[in-house]
């Protein structure tokens, strides 16, 4: 095994560059190093101005998503040796505006996320009534969708989001479904109001790449299709039984 | 407050129904009518037999369902393919009119043939 | 939702643009577009089927003429391509069904593989029935 590997890193300085350019750095190739280790080596030893987001280094925080050789990846879970002999091309997540180097503007995602009310909606009972009970089977209903870490790899993989920025997008819809399927939640109707419009559920054409790139196996594509079926049957009921059907 | 219900969900139901029906019925019909009979793998059925089969009201209803759902299936998928594949989002209204309009014309034609001919 | 516009309007942001050829950039995107284009061949076949049905209803002479039309090499070629796309449609539709339609039996989720396998069984049974009905043996 060679002892170094070349990393090509997208550099973009706001106000100076019209478009990102690629810079090449040689970093040590170690068996236990991930792409994020390579970036930290560059920042510590070669060029301190390289800018990127990261935090936990263990696939939980969802901050270090970038495009590695064209695929959206968590850079803390993507080993350099898998790309030997290199070079490894590291670019910011696709479909988002770039602020600087590898850092993207995630405001749009955060707005969409809060729109679908990803929390338990419920008329609060007094504390004395005790906790809301849930069986293991009820937990299993939504557990897969609750694994989302908001890393936005799915948005980066989704061509529909890239083409139509109004589309609510994979993670937000999967999280809406996560709460809809939670036995303690009563907010399904409110979320459906947000998602039943054409830029909500229906813009999705089941490309399925969100599910393929998800590091937590959430299956957003499946969640969206399930949600479509629920919404469609709900609408059918609404037309067939205009009064009292809901 | 409840927003006005779009018709999109109902179109999606028809699209999905069309997806199921065509996935199951089209391959065998296509192999028989499009390849096996013309290429002589299998002798085409005698006229009296095929006329009796297609003349039965159950066959008419099933074929009508296949045709109408199949046309809507095409319209919906093709609309989004143009929409995304060719980046024509701005022309969505015109594309929708064209696709669903053709599906409607095709469906009327199918009704005419299957219910008012033979 | 004007949020996005505000975000893009922030000065100094680099706004990437998706190429018209985005569906050629990844195998998964290409498969998606081919899958969607299968609908064109579905529509073609339904037109072909209606022409067949009409010919049968119109009499034996028209039926023979349709069979000649279907034997035209160009029509056979189109149908051969159509078969490839139709099979792509059937296979992808079956594969994606368990994702969109999770089934539960006695409180347990039915494994996706089982749903896919039972769809193939149903497909074979229906195809055999249609074959018997049309061909007569």
Image (cartoon, rainbow, N blue to C red):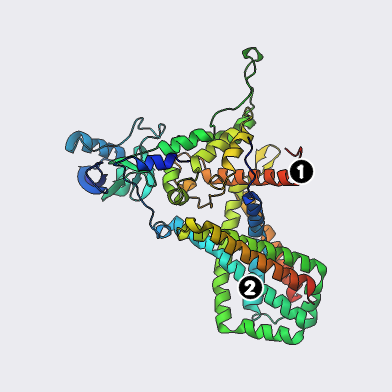
In-image side of A221 versus B46 (left or right) = left
Give the alpha-carbon distance from disc 1 to disc 2, as whole Å: 43 Å
Which residue is disc 1 drawn over?
A241
x 60%, y 67%: residue: C42
Query: For the image shown, how many numbered marks are present on the structure?
Result: 2
Residue sitting nearer the eye, A192 or B50: A192
x 43%, y 58%: residue: C23
Q: In this view, which residue lies farthest toward the top?
A: A128
Q: Nearer the viewer, mark 1 or mark 2?
A: 1
Residue sitting nearer the eye, C101 or A32: C101
**Residue A59 point in image, percent of width and height:** 40, 34
Image quarter for residue A31?
A: top left
Callout 2: few (<14), some (14-19), or many (20+) C-alpha neighbours within 10 Å? some
In-image side of A224 versus A238 (left or right) = left
Q: Chain of mark 1?
A: A
**Residue B88 point in image, percent of width and height:** 47, 59
Can residue C32 be seen here? The reply is no
Q: Mark 1: which secondary structure?
A: loop
Q: Mark 2: which secondary structure?
A: helix
Can residue C80 be seen here? The reply is yes
Which residue is disc 2 drawn over?
B31
User: Where does the C terminus of chain A fall, quadrant-wise?
Assistant: top right
x 79%, y 73%: residue: B116
Callout 1: few (<14), some (14-19), or many (20+) C-alpha neighbours within 10 Å? few
Tell me: residue C48, above or below residue C11.
below
**Residue B118 point in image, percent of width and height:** 80, 77
**Do pointers 1 and 2 mark residues of a single chain?**
no
Image quarter for residue A60?
A: top left
Tell me: residue B35, above or below residue B3.
below
Tell me: residue C15, above or below residue B89.
above
Q: Chain of mark 2?
A: B
Tell me: residue A162, above or below residue B50.
above
């Amino acid at each position: 095994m060679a002892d170094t590997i070349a990393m090509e890193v997208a550099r973009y300085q706001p106000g100076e560059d019209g478009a990102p350019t690629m810079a090449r750095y040689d970093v040590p190739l170690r068996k236990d190093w991930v792409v994020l280790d390579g970036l930290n080596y560059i920042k510590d030893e070669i060029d301190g101005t390289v800018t990127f987001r990261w935090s936990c280094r263990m696939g939980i925080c969802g901050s270090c998503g970038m495009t590695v050789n064209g695929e959206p990846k968590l850079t803390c879970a993507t080993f350099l040796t898998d790309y030997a002999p290199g070079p490894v091309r590291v670019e910011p997540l696709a479909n988002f505006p770039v602020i600087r180097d590898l850092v993207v503007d995630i405001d749009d995602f955060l707005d969409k996320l809060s729109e679908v009310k990803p929390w338990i909606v419920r008329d609060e009972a007094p504390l004395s009534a005790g906790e809301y009970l849930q069986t293991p089977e009820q937990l299993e209903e939504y557990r897969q969708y609750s694994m989302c870490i908001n890393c936005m790899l799915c948005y980066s993989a989704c061509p529909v989001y890239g083409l139509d920025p109004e589309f609510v997008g994979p993670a937000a819809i999967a999280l809406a479904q996560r709460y809809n399927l939670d036995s303690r939640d009563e907010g399904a109707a409110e979320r459906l109001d947000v998602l039943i419009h054409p830029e909500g559920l229906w813009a999705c054409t089941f490309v399925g790449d969100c599910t393929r790139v998800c590091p937590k196996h959430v299956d957003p594509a499946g969640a969206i299709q399930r949600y479509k079926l629920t919404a469609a049957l709900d609408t059918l009921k609404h037309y067939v039984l205009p009064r009292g059907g809901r | 407050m409840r927003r006005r219900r779009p018709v999109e969900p109902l179109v999606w139901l028809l699209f999905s129904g069309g997806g199921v029906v065509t996935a199951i019925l089209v391959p065998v019909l296509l192999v028989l009518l499009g390849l096996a009979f013309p290429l002589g793998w299998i002798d085409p059925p005698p006229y009296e037999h095929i006329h009796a089969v297609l003349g039965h009201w159950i066959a008419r209803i099933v074929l009508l369902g296949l045709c109408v759902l199949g046309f809507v299936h095409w319209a919906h998928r093709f609309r989004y393919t143009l929409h995304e594949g060719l980046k024509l989002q701005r022309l969505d209204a015109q594309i929708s009119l064209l696709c669903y309009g053709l599906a409607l014309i095709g469906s009327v034609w199918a009704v005419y043939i299957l219910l008012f001919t033979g | 939702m004007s949020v996005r516009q505000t975000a893009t309007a922030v000065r100094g942001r680099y706004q990437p643009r998706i190429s018209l050829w985005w569906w050629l950039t990844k195998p998964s995107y290409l498969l998606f577009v081919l899958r969607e284009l299968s609908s064109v061949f579905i529509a073609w076949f339904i037109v072909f089927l209606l022409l067949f049905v009409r010919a049968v209803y119109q009499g034996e002479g028209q039926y023979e003429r349709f069979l000649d039309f279907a034997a035209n090499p160009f029509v056979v070629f189109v149908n051969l391509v159509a078969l490839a796309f139709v099979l792509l449609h059937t296979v992808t539709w079956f594969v994606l069904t368990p994702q969109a339609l999770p089934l539960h039996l006695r409180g347990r989720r039915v494994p996706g593989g089982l749903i896919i396998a039972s769809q193939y069984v149903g497909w074979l049974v229906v195809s055999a029935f249609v074959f018997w009905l049309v061909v007569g043996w």
